[in-house]
Image (cartoon, rainbow, N blue to C red):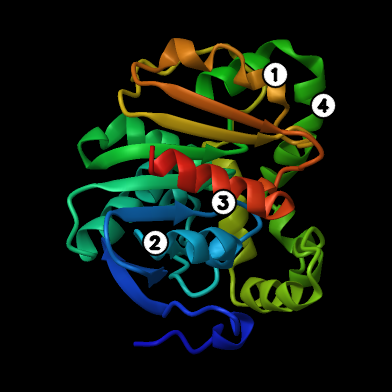
């Protein structure tokens, strides 16, 4: 069916957007799709929803089937109760479920922030379903673990995550507050609406279940990534410092393209939308 909820938000686009739901072990995962061709599946982070990829979807849809999901707990996807339901294995399973639902065996997977860590884990644990990997502002888990264990500035800048891990953290969130970073006034309205449909406790469960806890330890995941990887990182990100990007190539068996973006922050896909879109398109067509 045609996407009705956000049709007015995309008046200038010539491409047709459709939405649907995939079943992931009894949890409905909402997605929006456009175009046809090789599958490009996009995963948002916190606090966000599928709409964060609107610029990239418009540019890629003429050549690819682009699909942006709402992760569980967000917007129109199901919001199962219980922290255990937000374990990384289920987040990875949601991505696999959408790919299978769309009748594909593989996808190019794109992830930002929490979507980035889900994308990395998808590469580690479901490599047979991965064509290529694009990561925005989420260093390789080995790099992040190293910085949390050894870099006092990263430790200090991760204080927000430690607060989010507290049992009552969800009670301090509001839809308006979560949309603070959205610069475009019209887009911000859509974000407030989407966050109003989301589950704040579920959002915090991502951190309680999956984010490293003190005392931080320098540890390395044993799995390696063999497909080509594109990483784009806004250098003004204060949550995930760019020092964690160092040595990424040591944990990959495929080629790595690393693009750093000065004056762009954590939400690089919106802060530098044109550059990110152009880079993704060029890299996918090389």
Q: In front: mark 3 or mark 1?
A: 3
| Image coords of residue 142 (percent x, y) | 52, 18
Q: Residue at x 30, y 23 (%)?
A: 226
Q: Is residue 74 left or right of residue 242?
A: left
Q: Secondary structure at mark 2?
A: strand
Q: Secondary structure at mark 4?
A: helix
Instruction: Specify the label residue 93 is tagged with.
Output: none
Cα distance, mark 1 to mark 2?
A: 31 Å
Q: Is residue 14 left or right of residue 51?
A: left
Q: Is residue 133 above or below residue 245?
A: below
- Front residue of 13/152: it is 13
User: In the rendered structure, which disc, 3 or 1, sits on the residue that comes first in sequence?
Assistant: 1
Q: Residues within 10 Å of mark 3 (few under 14, many from 20)?
A: many
Q: Which residue is labeled 4 in the image?
A: 156
Q: In front: mark 1 or mark 2?
A: 2
Q: Which residue is labeled 2 in the image?
A: 66
Q: Residue at x 75, y 72 (%)?
A: 188
| Image coords of residue 185 (percent x, y) | 81, 74
Cα distance, mark 4 to mark 3?
A: 32 Å
Q: Secondary structure at mark 1?
A: helix
Q: Which residue is labeled 1 in the image?
A: 243
- Assess whether mark 2 and mark 1 are in contact (beta carbons under 8 angstroms): no
Cα distance, mark 4 to mark 2?
A: 37 Å
Instruction: Specify the label residue 277 is tagged with.
Output: 3
């Amino acid at each position: 069916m045609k996407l009705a909820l956000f049709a007015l938000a995309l008046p200038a686009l010539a491409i047709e957007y459709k939405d649907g739901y995939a079943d992931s072990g009894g949890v409905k995962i909402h997605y929006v799709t456009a175009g046809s061709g090789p599958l490009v599946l996009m995963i948002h982070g916190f606090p966000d929803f599928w709409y964060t990829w609107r610029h990239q979807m418009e540019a890629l849809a003429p050549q690819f089937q682009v699909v942006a999901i709402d992760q569980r707990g967000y917007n129109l996807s199901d919001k199962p109760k219980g922290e255990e339901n937000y374990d990384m294995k289920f987040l990875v399973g949601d991505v696999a479920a959408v790919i299978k639902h769309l009748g594909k065996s593989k996808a190019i997977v794109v992830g930002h922030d929490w979507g980035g860590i889900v994308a990395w884990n998808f590469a580690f644990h479901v490599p047979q379903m991965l064509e290529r990997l694009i990561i925005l502002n989420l260093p390789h888990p080995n790099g992040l673990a190293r910085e949390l264990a050894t870099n006092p500035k990263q430790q200090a800048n991760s204080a927000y995550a430690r607060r989010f891990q507290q049992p009552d953290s969800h009670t301090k969130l509001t839809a308006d507050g979560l949309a603070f970073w959205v610069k475009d006034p019209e887009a911000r309205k859509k974000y407030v609406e989407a966050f109003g449909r989301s589950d704040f406790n579920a959002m915090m469960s991502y951190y309680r279940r999956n984010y490293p806890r003190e005392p931080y330890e320098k540890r390395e995941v044993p799995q390696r990534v063999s497909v080509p990887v594109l990483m784009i990182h806004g250098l003004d990100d204060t949550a995930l410092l760019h020092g964690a990007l160092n040595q990424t190539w040591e944990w990959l068996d495929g080629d790595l393209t690393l693009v750093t973006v000065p004056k762009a922050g954590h939400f690089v896909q919106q802060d530098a939308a044109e550059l990110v879109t152009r880079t993704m398109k060029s890299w996918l067509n090389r």
